[in-house]
Amino acid sequence: MRRLLPVTDQTADDDREWSLEELAELYAYPEPGTEPGAGLNAGQAGRPGVWLRGNMVASLDGAAQYEGASQPLSGTADMRIFGVLRALCDVVIAGAETVRREGYRPAKAREAFAARRAAAGQTPAPAIAVVSASLELDFTAPLFTEPLVPTLVLTGAGAPAERVRAARRAGADVVVAGDGPGADPAAAVAALADRGLTRQLTEGGPRLLGGFVAAGVLDELCLTVAPVLTAGDAQRITNGPGTAVPERFALVSLLEEAGFLFTRYRRI
């Protein structure tokens, strides 16, 4: 793996396999009060220390999926960084369709990150938060029956009452974030922060990420550009309502391995 940005005295020596600790340092969440630029944007409702990071992969021609899943676009180094990003966060936020398509399971505790998480006051593994309006979820799946940390379900006040009860019977922590049928993006970020889950990571899918972008609550995007072309009509990494004006982000780091580019952008 090569570091292309930022350029340092050691950049020339970075064409090697990076340790998990080195990747963890590179991708560490900002310390509360040290957030770049304006720190917490208006969408975060002035909550100190809240940081929402997105992690997505796309092909050279902009596809976020191949045959309905993101995994075919990924690679060994991408999965390594994927694991590091999960190990650093308090909560992984994913849309219900992504959970179904990608076969989500509970996050695992990883020995390599145990001391780091303990020092940060985190649980041994991050919680998984599933965003769903209908709550048409399989509550017999391992995500709900075998989590190390209880799985959360983010929804709106208008969610079907019988599905809310089913989720709670399955041991899920149902979080009502908004007055509509589904979770409001900004309210979801705030509700998770109220539970102490301030280091947030969303893995999409495109509709969920698009909602966070449109709401102005995405602080950082980690985008892997895969060296493949897919053609077809796959979604982009975001979908849904547009922003009033294009959101500007600055490139803060760039890694490369086997033709994959691992970019990291932060809100300006």
Image (cartoon, rainbow, N blue to C red):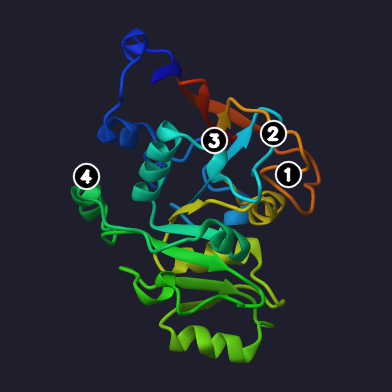
Distance of mark 3 from mark 1, alpha carbons? 34 Å
Q: Is residue 38 visible?
A: no
Asked if marks 4 and 3 touch (Cβ < 8 Å), the reply is no
Between residue 17 and residue 26, name the one nearer to us: 17
Residue, disc 1: 234
Residue, disc 4: 112
Asked if marks 1 and 2 touch (Cβ < 8 Å), the reply is yes
Q: Is residue 139 above or below residue 228?
A: below
Which label's residue is closer to the chain start, 4 or 1? 4
Distance of mark 2 from mark 4, alpha carbons? 35 Å
Q: Nearer the viewer, mark 2 or mark 4?
A: 2
Q: Nearer the viewer, mark 4 or mark 1?
A: 1
Distance of mark 2 from mark 3, alpha carbons? 36 Å
Amino acid under disc 2: Thr
Residue drawn where x is 54% and y is 64% of the image: 190
Q: Nearer the viewer, mark 2 or mark 3?
A: 2
Amino acid under disc 1: Ala
Residue drawn where x is 44% and y is 63% of the image: 128
Distance of mark 4 from mark 1, alpha carbons? 36 Å
Residue, disc 3: 37
Q: Nearer the viewer, mark 3 or mark 1?
A: 1
Between residue 91 and residue 63, name the one nearer to us: 63
In the picture, the disc for residue 230 is: 2
Looking at the rendered structure, the secondary structure element under dot 3 is loop
